[in-house]
Amino acid sequence: MKTTFFAGAGLLLTVSAGALAQSPPSINAAPPPQPPVAQTVPPPAAADMQAVLDAMVTLGAKPIEMLTPVEARLQPTATDAARTVMRKQGLSTAPDPAVTTQDLAYGADDMQYARIYKPVAAAGAAALPIIVYYHGGGFVIADVNVYDPTPRFLSKQLNAIVVSVEYRHAPEAKFPAQHDDAAAAYRWVLDNAAAWGGDTAKIALAGESAGGNLAVATAIFARDNRLTAPVHILAVYPIANSDMMLPSKQDSAKAKPLNTPMLNWFGYYYSRTKADQMDPRVNLVRANLRGLPPTTIVNAQIDPLRSDGETLENAMRAAGDRVERRTFEGVTHEFFGMGKVVRGAYDAELYAVDRLKTAFGIPRQ
């Protein structure tokens, strides 16, 4: 069996499926051979976004698609780069003390825990909105520490409890472990939110990248299992379409910090077989999307996952769902959460907050 890839200049190349066999469950498993990708130059980033990308180079970040999982997990992250820029601008990188955190287990595995963010101003309050948040990292890398900025920001801005879910990573635990953990954590939050001062009648799902995928997939799980439905989904540059020929996987094939070869790398490690990447929990555009809550999709212009968001929006509209999507110009994957140093991120964060305020019935000031 052969798989076809676009190699630029209208040329189609093929590689044997054997070269793309999925990885063993080892964090030291060698990276897969990378298929040819479109040799296009991505659009230029805005100056403030480029400063973050330049900081990643300064920090010594290596191409993740060339690394083993354990090596990739030790790489400087986009969050590290944003903090480097913040320090250069004289801004504090300390966590905002207006929000407190507590780590609690929702399962027996060491990775099955959640970080609960709560605004100090809401101490002792009841009936707070709740956001269950899933971090990104392609189901392989990153954790709740790397993705601290978004849940902390949402908690403060919305006076809400945000539950940032850690989950088992691939390749140690392959698909569908991450989706199973996301669903288990959602059940756990429903069972325990009242004890934290939360109101499960005002619960939303949110996530970035792989976490954006988990947010939508968990909403589907809640619908199918007749659990309390979230009032809103916030999916930031979600993984949603396994088609490697989508426009953004060509025009942003060489983008940073996420490129198209990295998408192949993540798929190699998280899936058991190539068929897993077509499962509707991953390939959301082929899922039954009917009856999902209102959804906000945030995309970056310079991102191979931009078309995932576009096609997910179309699929949700076709299913009769209410969905709104915005693509922010001049920014890249991972820009969300960088609002202190990237104007596009600031605008996207306020947009997301505004959408969640509407969902929670919070008056605008």
Image (cartoon, rainbow, N blue to C red):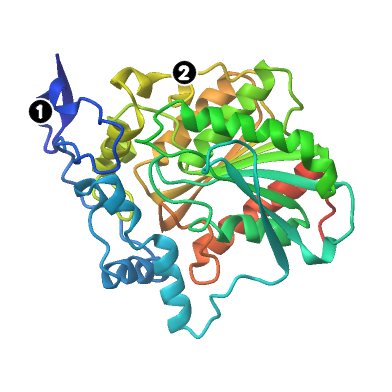
Q: Residue, x 58% and y 56% (percent of image)?
A: 150
Residue that mark 2 sits on: 286
Q: Residue, x 14% and y 13% (percent of image)?
A: 1
Query: Who is closer to the viewer here, 306 or 100?
Result: 100
Find residue 159 and report its horizontal and vertical position in percent: 78, 57
Find residue 170 and report its horizontal and vertical position in percent: 38, 36
* Image quadrant assignment for residue 249: top left
Find residue 65 and report its horizontal and vertical position in percent: 23, 46
Q: Give the residue type that dot 2 points to.
A: Arg
Q: Secondary structure at mark 2?
A: helix
State left or right for residue 35 relative to residue 132.
left
Q: Few, some or many C-alpha atoms within 10 Å of disc 2 (few <14, some 14-19, many ≥20)?
A: some
Q: Residue, x 34% and y 63% (percent of image)?
A: 76
Residue that mark 1 sits on: 13
Find residue 155 and report its horizontal and vertical position in percent: 71, 57
2 or 1: tag closer to the N-terminus: 1
